[in-house]
Image (spheres, helix red, strand yellow):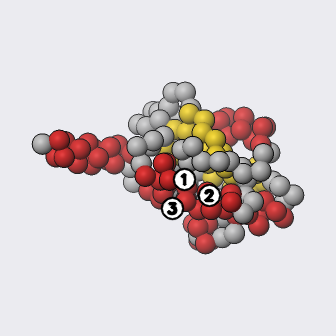
Amino acid sequence: MILALYSINNVYMDRILFSRNSDEWSTPNDFFNKLDEEYNFVFDLACSKDNCKTNDGFTIEDDSLKQNWALITYETGGGWLWINPPYSKCKEFVDKAYSEMLIGAKIVMLIPARTDTKWFHNFIYNKEGVEVKFIKGRLKFGDSINSAPFPSMLVIFNLVQ
């Protein structure tokens, strides 16, 4: 009985989390601008041609997961990288961010606050160089009228602080 309720809750949560036709949630401009004042981002690791938050970035065609993020940090003299990844691939992007941090990348990531997931515990929670900032309230992504149906968090990957 408990297992059945757990499965139903996971299916329900996934429907809520991915209730749109797309899993791309465009970062609210005012939210990003405040972060950019603090970090001075040099590159957007997951954007579209229409919503890149920096002067340069990887689009879906570039396949960010196959790129060398640490090289961008190195080439920009220690510049910060921004990423609001497709939420259906949080595990892959969090794993990649953690791995790239270990070789020098400095990344700020906006993702759903899914503290119950394996990827949260494997690559974020209590990891050296990783800081979590939970966002109060719910963000309104892109041009949506309503707030997101999930809480969000910032994950800062910066081994050399």
Between 37 and 144, which is closer to the camera in this rendering?
37
Is the C-beta separation of discs 2 and 1 under 8 Å?
Answer: yes
Give the class, few, some or many, for how many residues have Cα within 10 Å of label 2's Cα (few <14, many ≥20).
many
Q: Residue furthest right?
A: 77
**Residue at 61 percent of width and 72 percent of height:** 66
Q: Please give left or right for residue 127 compared with residue 148 in the image.
A: right
The residue under label 2 is which amino acid type? Ala
Residue that mark 1 sits on: 123
**Residue at 69 percent of width and 69 percent of height:** 68
Residue that mark 3 sits on: 92
- The answer to whether residue 42 shows anywhere in this view is yes
Q: Mark 1 or 3 closer to N-term?
A: 3
Q: Please give left or right for residue 136 compared with residue 51 in the image.
A: left
Q: CA distance from mark 3 to mark 2?
A: 9 Å
- The answer to whether residue 23 shows anywhere in this view is no
Between 58 and 50, which is closer to the camera in this rendering?
58
**Residue at 52 percent of width and 38 percent of height:** 152
- Where residue 23 sits in the image (x, y, percent)? 45, 53
Label for residue 67? none
Q: Quadrant of residue 16?
A: top left
Residue that mark 2 sits on: 97
Q: Quadrant of residue 61?
A: bottom right
The residue under label 3 is which amino acid type? Glu
Q: Please give left or right for residue 57 compared with residue 122 in the image.
A: right
**Residue at 40 percent of width and 43 percent of height:** 116
Q: Mark 3 or 2 closer to N-term?
A: 3
Can you say which quadrant of the picture contains the N terminus? top left
Q: Is residue 105 above or below residue 8?
A: below
